[in-house]
Image (cartoon, rainbow, N blue to C red):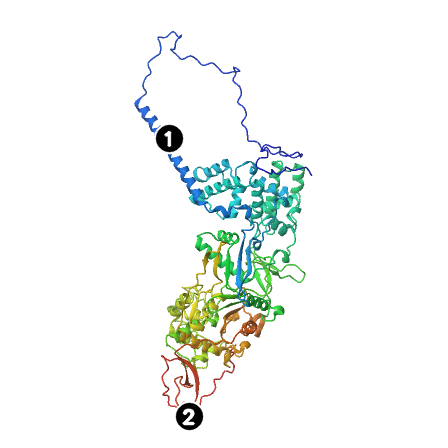
Amino acid sequence: MNEIRRIHRSDSEGAGRSAGTGSGRRVNTTRSRKEALPPSSGGGRRPAEPPAGGKGSGGKGPKKEKKGHPILRGIFRLFATLFCLGVMAGCALVVCAVFYVVQATANDGDLLNLDSIELSQSSVVVATDPDTGQQVEYATLRSSNSHRMWVDLEQIPTYLQYAFICTEDKDFYNEPGFNLKRTVGAMINEYIVPIYSGRQGASTIEQQLIKNLTGDDSASGIEGALRKLREIYRAYTLYRNYSKETILEAYLNTISFTGTIQGVQTAALEYFNKDVSQLTLWECAAIASITNNPTNYNPRTNPENLINRRNYVLYNMWNQGIISEEVYRDAIAQPLVLAEEDVSRTTATNNSYFTDALFEEVVQDIMEKEGITEAAAQQMLYTGGFTIEATVNPKIQTQMEELMLNTDDAYFPAGWHEEEVSALSEDDIPVYNDDGTLKTTTAEDGTVTYYRNVRTQAAMVMLDYDGNVVAMVGGLGEKTQDLTLNRAYSVTRQTGSAIKPIGAYALGIEYGLVNWSTMLNNSPLYLKSDMVIRNDDYCRQHGLSGLSDEALRAYPNAWRNWPQNYGGNYGDNRDVPLWNGLARSLNTIAARVGDLVGASTIFNFAYNTLQLDTLDPVNDVGLAPMVMGSQTHGVTPMALAAAFQIFYDGQYTTPHLYTRILDRDGNIYLENNATSYQALTPQTATIMNQLLQNVLYSSVGTAAGRYPTTGNMRSFGKTGTTTDERDLWFVGGTPYYVTAVWWGYDSPYDMTRTLGSQARTRTCVEAWKALMNVVQEGYEYKEFPMADGVVQRSYCTESGLLATSGCPGTAVGYYNANDLPATCNYDHSGGVVPTQLDTTGIDTD
């Protein structure tokens, strides 16, 4: 192979040095020169003609100069004045521009410090060690977490260096950080006259490096012009302060490729499984091609596009004398051979789901504080050297992660089934035919449908009663990627019955509309004859879906009873006390309580007070979404767990993942914006807490007997099931923590079709129970607070009123001392003896 051009090693090395000694074409590093003008035909300068009428001309002597025409003199003076004003305005503009760039770049010292760029790329997450109480390092947010590995320029092949230089900035070694000619041309094209067919780039390598370091990338308009002004000044500053080699090294280590891959070393490992120093010429050209458009030139998804771009880069290298024609033609003939993806190498991570969620939360808070883009906020976080004081309990996080590994499907059955998709991703498990071919179907219009195997997923999140998120896991199995789908933090699902306590029941108690023993009829709130609730299946089958309610009244069968209880029954038409309806999660009872409170009141409480702001303000204001849990989008597990905080002492605190963020000098940069306030009175909170304990400790509760036993502390909870068992929930609380557990498919699917009777909320309850038995091992015994003004009283099991000696059956309930039920005045002389409620045939799970 012929020798290639040596890289200049200092600014002073000859700008006009030869491009190399190989057989390839040479790069002309001298300034372009105009051709010399042809000499005049006389071979020299023609003598000047004597002035007409001068001495020796035979005239009468010099003539008297005539004065110019007054109009012409006026025009001349006008143009002269305008010229002077233009010069003055130009000078003023230059002064303003200089003042602007000086002010706008006043804080560039750290951002553009290339000597410490590696050290500036780390922010540390610290947490409190539960055993020692000391703050310990929990995670590090740095560029390596974004798949960047730093290498010195000497390790980067000269071919790779020139692949970038020849394509991105061929005058790199001969310009002062910016290219004046290209900049002026681009600005004229953008703001004055379109002299080119499309938008022209004018960025040098220095300017591209500045974009990587600052995130300052405004595209067009006035802000685009100001950005270009800042960029040119910063580029010139880099040129003055650093050698070209240092600038090139920083550029090659910070440039972005596909996904979160940054830097040429990481790209070499990702695409070719080689150290960057081992890359061949055509591999160097391929890597240099990706950055122009990482999506369009993604080597794994658009290989043909990448090959075309690679060959263009190689052509530039030949055209500029870096390689010979023979080498060029050999390189473009090479196929694109990528390394097989090694999951253990390319996707292994040290980041937990908690750290991922923390990263997203901090980025959003930086964006709000600084008024910058998400990309710029991420860059600040990676390079700012912040110390983030996280709320995570490292010990509990580890315990939750171990449980959610779900080894051998110990807690959450897999329930595999095929799912149709329009395309297969890297993480998908394709379905194959018996002959080993990929299973697909093709529609008449040529659209191809693929099939993948999917299993159930789960999420779990735990908070204390001050809103601190202490642990979070957003999926089953080993976590293999950073910033992957976090089902605990960012995925909303319908809540099913899990929403009943935080809306209907809590407000019914709060407003004195119902109490522990209020008797409610176990029957539909609306009958078919009331013509209130549509029978959607009937309307759809008979083409009536588009009719108005008024028009639909002509079709009696277009209506139905509502609601029905789990399992399809409409109740037994018997009166049951409120506590029993809540423990059994009877929809009929919850709907009656919700009707008393009002759907809009429940929605406003959930949306505004409990900050469940993913609910739909238009479509979710109704008893079905706010009592039955059939919301448009639903809520996240973290948000639902936070809502259940109120059953401790009535206080709600916004869930948060950090308390403070300190800058590199130890000053407070950010404090979490969590709000804390009394959502319910302490009395209502205590009564609701006791009501929800019946879910676990009553024989008719939907989670009967499935409570943690470690420490002999009491617990409360609520199950939730959506239509066709598409989402299963449990939210449970102990005196220390409240935890939400979700289980289902990423794309909602009837789990009974794959798991049969295994698809029950008991799965979520058992997982929570197992975790709490481990977490609270060795914890000091603690009780839920009992608010002043809450009293226990005996009530009549027939009337639900305070019992008297004449009542045939009594039980004990919890009440607000200021809002006790009346004393029972029922005539029990008939001798009717109350019996135990018949729960035969009712699946309370």
Q: Work out whether mark 1 precedes mark 2 in sequence or the reverse, and give the earlier one.
A: 1
Which structural element holds mark 1?
Answer: helix
Residue under label 2: 831
| Nearer to us in this view, 530 or 296 | 296
Q: Quadrant of residue 799?
A: bottom left
Q: Which amino acid lies under the numbered mark 1 shown in the image of this protein?
A: Phe
On the rendered structure, is 210 left or right of 432?
Answer: left
Vertical relation: 632 (above or below) 257:
below
* x 62%, y 55%: residue: 346
- Distance from Cα at disc 1 to Cα at disc 2: 114 Å
Vertical relation: 409 (above or below) 797:
above
Q: Quadrant of residue 353?
A: bottom right
Q: Position of residue 401 (x, y in %)?
A: 57, 66
Q: Quadrant of the N terminus?
A: top right
Q: Is residue 677 visible?
A: yes
Residue under label 1: 83
Q: Which amino acid lies under the numbered mark 2 shown in the image of this protein?
A: Gly
